Image: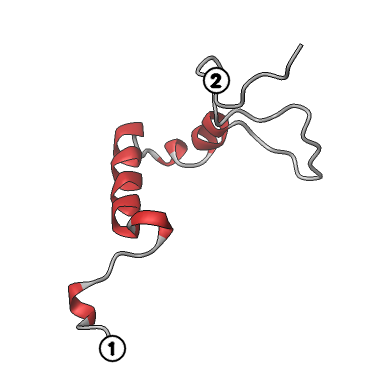
Amino acid sequence: MPPPDPLSWEQDPLDLDPSWDSPIPLLPLQQALDQTVFQSGLSREAWLRRLAGQLHRRGPYGRSAPSAAAGPAG
């Protein structure tokens, strides 16, 4: 039987792979968020809005978007 497709819609793409051996104990994303970000009182909606804004400012490929205040390049 072939291994499961890693891009399968039936699986959570952010789920931890139980076969991955790590010397550091890892938490599932939801549990980590519950114990850190959301415990501070920040709502899921506010966190997602903040994350989307940060990603938007980063631009494509993880690069920071050019700033108009930086002036012309060159």
- Residue at 76% of width from left, 11% of height from top? 1
Q: Residue at x 33, y 53 (%)?
A: 54
Q: Position of residue 19 (x, y in %)?
A: 78, 29
Left or right relative to 47: residue 15: right
Quarter containing the C terminus: bottom left
Instruction: Kindly indicate the quadrant of the structure image that contains residue 22.
Output: top right
Residue 33 on image: x %, y %: 50, 36
Pointer 2: what residue? 8
The image shows residue 70, relative to residue 58, as above or below, that is below
Position of residue 7 measured from the top left corner of the image (x, y, whole percent): 55, 26
Return the x and y of residue 38 as percentages of the image width and height: 43, 36
Q: Report the side of 34 relative to 44 (left or right).
A: right
Q: Single out the residue that lies furthest toward the front.
A: 2
Q: Residues within 10 Å of mark 1 (few under 14, many from 20)?
A: few
Q: Is residue 12 above or below residue 33?
A: above
Residue beneath the point at 54% across and 14% down: 10
Marks 1 and 2, how far apart at CA: 45 Å
Q: Determine contact: label 1, label 2, CB under 8 Å.
A: no
Which residue is tagged 1?
74
Query: What's under tag 2, amino acid-wise?
Result: Ser
- Element type at mark 2: loop
The extreme top residue here reads: 1
Q: Quadrant of residue 41?
A: top left
Mark 2 crowd level (few <14, some 14–19, many ≥20, 10 Å Cα): few
Q: Quadrant of residue 44?
A: top left
Amino acid type, callout 1:
Gly
